[in-house]
Amino acid sequence: MPALNNTTLYRGRFAPSPSGALHLGSLVAAVGSYVDAKANNGTWLLRIEDLDPPREVAGAADSILRCLEAHGLHWDEEVSYQSQHHQYYQQSLQRLRELQLTYACDCSRKLIQQQGGHYRGYCRHRQVTAKQSSIRFFNHQPVVEFDDEHYGHIQADRAFAEEDFILRRKDGFYAYHLAMVTDDIRQGVTHVVRGADLLQPSACQLSLYRALAASPPYYLHLPVVVSQPGRKLSKQNHAPALNNDCASVNLTRVLTLLNHAVPAELNGADCASILHWAVGNWSRAKLPASYEVLIPKAENS
Ligand code: GLU
């Protein structure tokens, strides 16, 4: 892992989707990305990934902002909202089109399921003209391995990494990989710190960086919080929203899950003091080696 010094540029970010309030699992990504950035004299950006209106919950974006503030996680620069940046995604799509790396596809999800669940490039040479078609990435030079700053050398699942994934959906919305990569390039993000559930998708994102001839960021994935093995805390699993009145306790729990137990003398301390301690004592080497961390039963709320 390259040692960072004071002159190394570090721009990190937290990029929640406003599909619900933050929970303990999302706080791991928020705290991990914040502390890693600040421990390296970096900038920490906040980007609201409100790209998928059908999945959004009214008021969630504001509640995320308030929750981060209540936990002392103050972002640098202006909050960025993906819903306001469609023109940049269009530009990336256009660039890929010029490079002949896009094509239209009208395959249904059902058809892809019948073919084994992975898209095999069926429409690559079909010249689909249907109105209801998605736009796919012609992933002819897929990235299938990369280094993660925490988990080391990653060999991605080939069937997944080699897929011609969607850039723009049938309903006209831009897809996550395209928007995320476009924004991370545009915002000069150098370090992506997030949950290990996004480890495999990094391969697809790296293929886009390669196609767009942009330098990729460092990736550092953090263990995912589970309530029982394999059961990730998530909005879909009805993980309880964080209680802002217990912000310093929440921070302490998250840091403990990341093997950075806050010393007893900070019991009852405010968020700023806990985060200050975390930044001063942060060590990537101490992060749990596993892909999942289990919250103790008694704390399972
Ligand atoms: N918006 C994504 C999510 O909430 C995270 C994106 C990322 O960190 O790359 O799952």
Image (cartoon, rainbow, N blue to C red):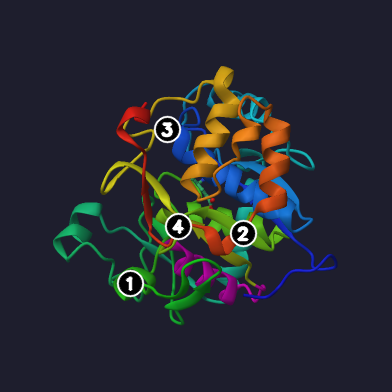
Query: Label 1: few (<14), some or many (≥20) within 10 Å?
Result: few
Q: CA distance from mark 1 to mark 4?
A: 22 Å
- Identify the disc placed on residue 283: 2
Query: Label 4: few (<14), some or many (≥20) within 10 Å?
Result: some
Is residue 17 at all visible to an observer of this figure?
Answer: no
The disc labelled 4 sits on which kind of residue?
A: Pro
Residue drawn at the location 39% of the way across and 33% of the way down: 235
Is residue 112 at all visible to an observer of this figure?
Answer: yes
The disc labelled 3 sits on which kind of residue?
A: Pro
Asked which secondary structure carries label 2, the reply is loop
- Identify the disc placed on residue 157: 1
Residue drawn at the location 38% of the way across and 61% of the way down: 129
Q: CA distance from mark 4 to mark 2?
A: 11 Å
- Identify the disc placed on residue 288: 4
Q: What range of the chain is rendered magenta? A: 201-215
Task: Return the disc, 1 or 4, that comes first in the chain's sequence.
Answer: 1
Residue drawn at the location 77% of the way across and 39% of the way down: 78
Task: Return the disc, 1 or 2, that comes first in the chain's sequence.
Answer: 1
Q: Which residue is mark 3?
A: 54
